[in-house]
Image (cartoon, grey):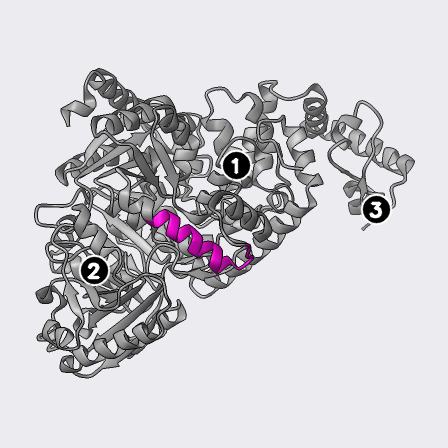
Amino acid sequence: MSTVHNGAEGAWLQGRTEILDRLKAALADPDARFKVPELQVARTMGPSPVTDVSGDTDLSILFGAMLDKVGGSHEILDDSEAVPGAVIRHFETLRNARKEDGLSFDRILAWAPDKLGIAGLGDTLRQAHIDVVVPPDLNKVECREQASHIAVGITGADAAMASTGTVVLGSGPGRSRSASLLPLHHIVLVAMSRLHATIEAWMATLREEGRLDEALRTASQLSLVTGPSKSADIELTLTLGVHGPRTVHAIVYRDGA
Amino acid sequence: MKVDVEAPYRTRIRQALEDTDVRSAVNRAMGQLAERRERAVGAIDNERMRVDARAAREGAIRQLPNLLEEVERTLTENGSVVHWARDAGEANRIVVEIARARGVQSAVKSKSMVTEEIHLNKALEAAGIDVVETDLGEYIIQLADEPPSHLVAPVIHKRAEDISELFQERLGMEPSLDAAVMCDTARQVLRQRFLTADMGISGCNFAIAETGTVCLITNEGNGRMVTSLPPVHVVIAGIEKVVATPEDALLLWQAASRNATGQDVSVYFSMSSGPRRAGHPDGPEEMHVILLDNGRTRVLESGYADALLCIRCGACLDVCPVYREIGGHAYGATPYSGPIGSILTPLMADDMGATKDLPFASSLCGSCRDACPVRIDLPRLLLELRSEIVAEGQTSMAESATVKGLTLPMLGPRRYRWATRVAQRFGRLLGAASGYLSWLPPPLSAWTRSRVFPRPAAKTFRELWRDK
């Protein structure tokens, strides 16, 4: 990035040094910098969970209820083999309710089949005349142009949190950010083994399993999504689908684990 | 009449109070926001969350230089380019340089108070770059050429009628007062901008030191668009935005959501750790993070580190009886209004100048202190700042005389006894029926011109005590 710093390198270094030096000098006695300091000793443990979930709660049911509450919808399947049929049924419901808005319902913007984690899903969709589009490079104009007219997107989820109805979507090879962002409708497949009670429980699991860096840093972007896109900017009136999807439908399924 | 944000303090307040349309719109909206907030924090152990959130923020500010060095390292490891800017001018120059190096012609921006603070749009426009706001509220005020009036709900001072007229005039929308129709119009226009922009610009809610991650809170999804579609993503982050761990960021996200909009969590929380890697189908090719001081170090040096804990949720605005009456524009040309803005704006300024009046725009009722999710004692800070401003003689003679007049009797028991007796007789003389005096003779009239003065009690406390 040397082109960017051209000629400004000196000023940049000077700025960095000045800011850090002033902060270090001011914080030599941090207590003196606060009017009302509260932190007597440094905290050793992470924060407590904000939401409580009792031990015997069925996480699928709680997740579904919380997602419904924020304007999403869901169904719970006892068998992963039922997933392709459920996807097609939901897709057809959306297609039947379509408006004349220039969006195409003969295709679906998707994560790569192996990232969706449901065997045979691609074939079943194609048999139902729904073309599966897995974009190779959305920074190419024609690829982006094509993707932007697709009405429905489908993704898996790296994790999901029951107490808030949140899904975690990591970007990566075969896992576009766009599939959950550009279409008007988003279908998300959630394996029960990836459900956590709370956001804090999810973080604790990542730490325990030593997967924190992998989850956050190699993904380049981790999106936590809780329901459909919304705005209340006009007189606090709730409107859905401002920029992101207007509907979010979760299909929660029992998997091997 | 619109509030002229560049006008002097008293003029702005008068204009705001005379605009009954805006007053009732803001009052109604704040009531609703406060109610939603009340419900959301009532559903959880809010005191525990406040203590945890306070610990996360205070811990970060106490070790700010270390965390900044750590986040610089982790951001760089993730492939982001880190820049440091001492002030608004430096930050704007850096953004323009990046834009020039990449041949950027159009940019999309997600809602960010810090870019309002440094007037980035003006700098980009001066460099010939077409920049568009993409948060619906920010887009509306950009079309109307007005500054935001609330940290979270920037267009809260406008009615649906005003917005509809604006969209008809500027976007050729068919007449409609339906918020969904207006939203859809904006969606169509802005979608094209997202797909074709050369650069995405965002602020930063939290920068995680441990993992080099920039976090953005949004509900509309524009944050995800801005950070995912354009080939270059530029982040402007105040240096106080750094937090130690992802756990802290996720806690503060929940605290901000409940307090800002009454949601359990916002719809989107985007955690960006660098540009797209090889083989990723989308995401920016380049990511830049500008760490901006612009007066924050000064706030710390002045001994107001408490104010740097703020997570910009707007709860102190929503519960403030003064903000509800005067709205955000009465606080002047600053994106930070309400109680927290009255502290940050003068302290961050090179020269307090005209902003020295802001700490006086409060009744010190304490609602903001009770609401603040990171337990900032706002009335205490306002009071300290007032006394510093008075001590430095940065206020009118009459006001400082009144404050001094109220201070002198406190300096000894005899003086106090004498003063309360004088006040007692004086009170009887003026014979106010209510508990307040709305007029005092000169020179004290300088005080009652804009405030009421409590009527002295019929009996002093000492007399009451003696009579018991």
As helix, strand or loop, the secondary structure at mark 1 comes to loop
- Do the residues under discs 2 and 1 have CB atoms within 8 angstroms? no
The magenta-colored residue range is B175-191
- Do the residues under discs 1 and 3 have CB atoms within 8 angstroms? no
Residue occupying image coordinates x 20% and y 66%: A107
Discs 3 and 2 carry the same chain letter: no
Crowd class of label 1 (few under 14; some 14 to 19; many from 20; radius 10 Å):
some
Residue occupying image coordinates x 8% and y 49%: B279
Q: Amino acid at mark 3?
A: Ser
**Viewer-side residue, A186 vs B10:** A186
- Measure the alpha-carbon separation of dots 2 and 1: 45 Å
Residue assigned mark 2 = A204
Q: Amino acid at mark 1?
A: Glu
Q: Quadrant of residue A33?
A: top left
Q: Position of residue B457 (x, y in %)?
A: 81, 42
Q: In this view of the protein, can residue B259 be seen by the observer?
A: no
Q: Is residue B317 above or below residue A51?
A: above
For marks 1 and 3 on the same chain, the one whose residue lies earlier in the sequence: 1
Mark sitting on residue B146? 1
Q: Quadrant of residue B4?
A: top right
Residue occupying image coordinates x 89% and y 36%: B430
As helix, strand or loop, the secondary structure at mark 3 comes to loop
Specify whether residue A118 is painted magenta: no
Q: Which chain is mark 3 on? A: B
Mark sitting on residue B434? 3
